[in-house]
Image (cartoon, rainbow, N blue to C red):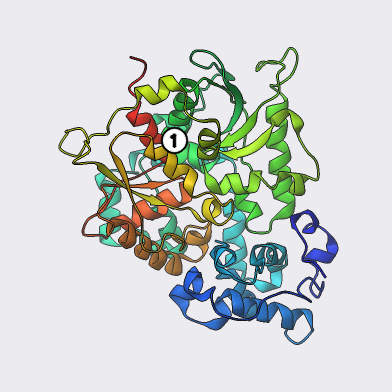
C-alpha cells in the first residue's frame, strides 16, 4: 500500500481517523532520525520523535490508540522540518505522513479553546498583508526603539502571556517600505532580456523585511531578467499549508494564481508572453508553491515552473555584466575584502530549502561568485532553528531553545555575517543572536549579492 501524496490530502479518507494511510511503511526504528529531530533535541522523549510518532500512527490506524488531546500534543511538537527524511536510510517519507496527519490535528476536541483561538487569530492575520500592515502601523513608534528595549528588559511584554511575548520578540523595526507595494507591474530587464519571471512578494516578508524583495528585483533586472509583479497579490498559502488548513490554503493559492493571470495576456499590463518561471525569495513559500499542482489539482502553464530565487539564478547563471560588476564586500572597519582577508559568511540552511526542496549547493555557489567571500559551515546545519512557520508562536519555549542552539552554532563559526533565505528563520535567528557574546547580523543572500554589485563599469 503506497503512502498518499498531497494530491489526496484533501479527501475525506485522508482526513478521517483510521484511514489506513500508515498500514505499510519502511520504518525499521533504527534511530538515525533522532539526532536530526529538532523536537527530540529539546524534549528528549520518544513520542516527540519521528520514530515515536510513526509508532503512534500505526497504533491509531490499528485502533489500538485513540487520537485524543494528549496524543495530538506529541504531533503538535513536530516542526515539520523534514530533517528526518534526509537522514532516514530506509527512505521513510515522514514528510508525507505528517502532512497527511496535520488536518486531523485541527479537530476542535484536540486543542484547548485558547489554542484554537490563537491559531485562528494567526491565520486571519499573517497571510493577509493588508491586515498585518493595519495592525503594525501603530507599532512603528515602538518597534526598534528604546521603548521596545525598555519593555523587554522590564519584563512588561511577558505579562501578556508566552505566545504574545514570543510575537513581540520577533517584531523588527518597520521602515516606510513595510507599508506599501509600489512596484510597477512590469520591471524591465537591464540590457538585452534573457528571461521573463514573476516574483511572489510573500506576506510576512514584504512587511517585516521589505529590503529582500527590493534587492531581488534589482538583482534580477541587472541580470537581464524581466520581472512581473501583480499589485494585488497575496499570500501563497505556505503558513496554512504547513498547518493542515487545506481549505484556506487552496483559497490563498487560487487567489495568488489569479493575481498573476490577471496581468498576463493580450492587452494586459504585463504583456501577452508567458513566464519562464515563478520565483520567490522565501524558501518556506517555495516549498508550498512547488506543490501547487497537487494543492489546486491543476497546472498553470502561463506561469512557468516554480523556482527558489537562488535556484533560478544558479540555473540560468549570472550575466557577464553582472558578474563583472561584483565587488568585494567591506569588513566592519570599512576595508574591502581581499584574498588574504576574505569576508566570512555563515550560511543557514532553512529546512524547507534544504530538506523540503533539496537545495544546498545553489545558494553557496551564488555567494561564491562574490570576490573574496568564504562560506563557514555550521556544525549542525541541518537542524531546525525553531521558526517553522508559526511554531515559534505556538510552541515558544521549545522554539526559543532551538533558536539559542542555532544562533550559538552560527556565531561559533567565526563568520562575520549570517545568511538566511527564509523570513521566519531570519527573524528567529536575529532575535536569538541577542543573547550571544558575539552576535552576527542576519541578512538574506540576495541582499549580499545586491550589496556586492557595483553596477556596469
Is 180 or 190 nearer to us in this picture?
190
* 143 displayed left or right of 268: left
Name the residue at 47% across, 77% down. Answer: 43
> Taking 396 as reference, is 427 above or below it?
above
> Taking 252 as reference, is 1 above or below it?
below
Name the residue at 72% across, 24% down. Answer: 262
Is 372 or 286 nearer to us in this picture?
372
> Where residue 306 sits: x, y (%)?
64, 38
> Where residue 446 sits: x, y (%)?
43, 36
| Quadrant (top left, top right, bottom left, bottom right) of the N terminus | bottom right
> Taking 89 as reference, is 346 above or below it?
above
- Tag 1 secondary structure: helix
| Quadrant (top left, top right, bottom left, bottom right) of the C terminus | top left
Is 214 or 1 nearer to us in this picture?
1
Name the residue at 46% across, 43% down. Answer: 363
* 274 displayed left or right of 431: right
> Where residue 407 sits: x, y (%)?
33, 59
Name the residue at 19% across, 39% down. Answer: 332
Amino acid at each position: 500500500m503506497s503512502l498518499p501524496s498531497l494530491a489526496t490530502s484533501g479527501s475525506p479518507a485522508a482526513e478521517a481517523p483510521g484511514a489506513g494511510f500508515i498500514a505499510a511503511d519502511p520504518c525499521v526504528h533504527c534511530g538515525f532520525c533522532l539526532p536530526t529531530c529538532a523536537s527530540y533535541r529539546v524534549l528528549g522523549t520518544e513520542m516527540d520523535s519521528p520514530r515515536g510518532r510513526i509508532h503512534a500512527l500505526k497504533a491509531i490506524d490499528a485502533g489500538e490508540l485513540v487520537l485524543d488531546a494528549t496524543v495530538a500534543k506529541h504531533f503538535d511538537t513536530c516542526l515539520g522540518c523534514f530533517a528526518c527524511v534526509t537522514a532516514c536510510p530506509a527512505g521513510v517519507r515522514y514528510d508525507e505522513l505528517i502532512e497527511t496527519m496535520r488536518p486531523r490535528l485541527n479537530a476542535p476536541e484536540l486543542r484547548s479553546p485558547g489554542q484554537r483561538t490563537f491559531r485562528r487569530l494567526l491565520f486571519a492575520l499573517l497571510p493577509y498583508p493588508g491586515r498585518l500592515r493595519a495592525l503594525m502601523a501603530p507599532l512603528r513608534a515602538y518597534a526598534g526603539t528604546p521603548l521596545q528595549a525598555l519593555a523587554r528588559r522590564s519584563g512588561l511584554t511577558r505579562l501578556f502571556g508566552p505566545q504574545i511575548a514570543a510575537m513581540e520578540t520577533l517584531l523588527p523595526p518597520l521602515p516606510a517600505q513595510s507599508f506599501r507595494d509600489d512596484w510597477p507591474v512590469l520591471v524591465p530587464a537591464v540590457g538585452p532580456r534573457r528571461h521573463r519571471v514573476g516574483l511572489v512578494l510573500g506576506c510576512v516578508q514584504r512587511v517585516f523585511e521589505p529590503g529582500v524583495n527590493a534587492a531581488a528585483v534589482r538583482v534580477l533586472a541587472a541580470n537581464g531578467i524581466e520581472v512581473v509583479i501583480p499589485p494585488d497579490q497575496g499570500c501563497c498559502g505556505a503558513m496554512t499549508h504547513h498547518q493542515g488548513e487545506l481549505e484556506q490554503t487552496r483559497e490563498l493559492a487560487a487567489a495568488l494564481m489569479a493575481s498573476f493571470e490577471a496581468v498576463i495576456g493580450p492587452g494586459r499590463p504585463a504583456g501577452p508572453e508567458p513566464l519562464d518561471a515563478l520565483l520567490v525569495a522565501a524558501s518556506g513559500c517555495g516549498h508550498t508553491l512547488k506543490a501547487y499542482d497537487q494543492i489546486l489539482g491543476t497546472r498553470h502553464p502561463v506561469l512557468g515552473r516554480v523556482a527558489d530565487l537562488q535556484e533560478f539564478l544558479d540555473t540560468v547563471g549570472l550575466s557577464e555584466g553582472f558578474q563583472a560588476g561584483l565587488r568585494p564586500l567591506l569588513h566592519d572597519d570599512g576595508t574591502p575584502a581581499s584574498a588574504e582577508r576574505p569576508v566570512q559568511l555563515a550560511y543557514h540552511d532553512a529546512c524547507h530549502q534544504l530538506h523540503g526542496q533539496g537545495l544546498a549547493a545553489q545558494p553557496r555557489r551564488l555567494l561564491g561568485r562574490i570576490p573574496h567571500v568564504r562560506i563557514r559551515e555550521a556544525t549542525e546545519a541541518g537542524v531546525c532553528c525553531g521558526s517553522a512557520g508559526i511554531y515559534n508562536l505556538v510552541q515558544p519555549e521549545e522554539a526559543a531553545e532551538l533558536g539559542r542552539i542555532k544562533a550559538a552554532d552560527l556565531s561559533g563559526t567565526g563568520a562575520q555575517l549570517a545568511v538566511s533565505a527564509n523570513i521566519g528563520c531570519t527573524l528567529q535567528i536575529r532575535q536569538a543572536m541577542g543573547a550571544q557574546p558575539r552576535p552576527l547580523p542576519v541578512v538574506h543572500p540576495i541582499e549580499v549579492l545586491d550589496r556586492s554589485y557595483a553596477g556596469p563599469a
